[in-house]
Amino acid sequence: MPKKKESKKSENTTKKKAEIQEEKERSGKKKKTIVWLILIVSVIVGTMLSPIFTIKNIEVQSNKKVEAEEIIRLSGVSINDNMFWKTTGMIKKNVKANALIDKVYVTRALPDKLIIKVTERSEDYLLIESEGNYYINNQGYILSAGDVASTTVSLYGLSEHSITLGNRISEYNLKKLNVVNQIMNNCEDHYLDSENQIALSDVISKIDVTSISDITIEIKSEEKTIHIGDESNLNGKLTYIPKIIQETKGQAGDIYVNMNLSEKYPYFSPKRDVNKEVEQSNE
């Protein structure tokens, strides 16, 4: 019996020693792995911070409205900075601080060139406000102060309580803007001059959505105001407009398509010439 107990005790001791040895080996491997990781990271960081990766050229691409100098200034990156000093995410965020910038792509052309490519928002409409005019895009972003002399379509009826460049217009006005976008998209399919590819959307000067049930479009070059009514059956209503404009060429007035087209036919109403009427009454 004593021999069996001693044998068992010896086995336990051997097993414990083996476990301790395995633990030491695992611990040693972990230490080696950590050391190697530290060395690798040190080499990578050292290489990244090396003078080899000093920026010598910053190239801005695809910008039309925003000057390259302004984009570089916004990026926060300068010539002689280290290529990796700022992350691409930081650079993108900085450049997009300009409301005209929609998307930013940053490429490191190693060893010393940084490329910043941008996609700019388009100035689709001139928002007419009592306190000033502002360019907005078709997504409702307020881009910059506007010029009344602009050829951009003037947009009335989207009264904003507060204007902050870079922000979007209110949810309520976004719904109105959606209707405006539908009108413009449909107008692209209706031509005043098919031979020269002049669509209705090319000649619209003003859209008024003050009342969403009584929308009006102005074509200044033709001296005509088009009464659309609400946004229902837009394509059907717009189908009649090119023909009516051609038939009333040179006459100022109003075109009415704001009716149930299955019951009534669109018509043109000439603008009254008050001066002529006065002259005739005095004769």
Image (tube, rainbow, N blue to C red):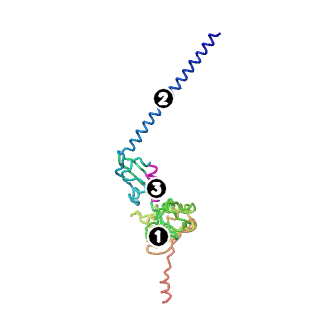
Q: Position of residue 101 (x, y in %)?
A: 45, 57
Residue sitting nearer the eye, 175 or 116: 116
- Which numbered circle lies on residue 29? 2
Bounds of the magenta segment: 88-104
- Mark 2 neighbour density, 10 Å: few (under 14) some (14–19) many (20 or more): few
Where 31 sits versus 60, above or below? above
* Badge 3 element: loop
Q: Position of residue 13 (x, y in %)?
A: 58, 18
- Of tags 2 and 1, which is closer to the observer? 2
Q: What is the three-letter code of the residue carrying label 2? A: Lys
Give whichever of discs 2 and 1 has the lower sequence position.
2
Q: Are marks 2 and 3 in contact (CB under 8 Å)?
A: no
* Badge 2 element: helix
- Which numbered circle lies on residue 270? none
Q: Position of residue 15 (x, y in %)?
A: 57, 19
Q: Are marks 3 and 1 in contact (CB under 8 Å)?
A: no
Q: What is the three-letter code of the residue carrying label 1? A: Ile
Give whichever of discs 2 and 3 has the lower sequence position.
2
Q: What is the three-letter code of the residue carrying label 3? A: Lys
* Cα–Cα span, label 2 and label 3: 47 Å
Q: Quadrant of the N terminus?
A: top right
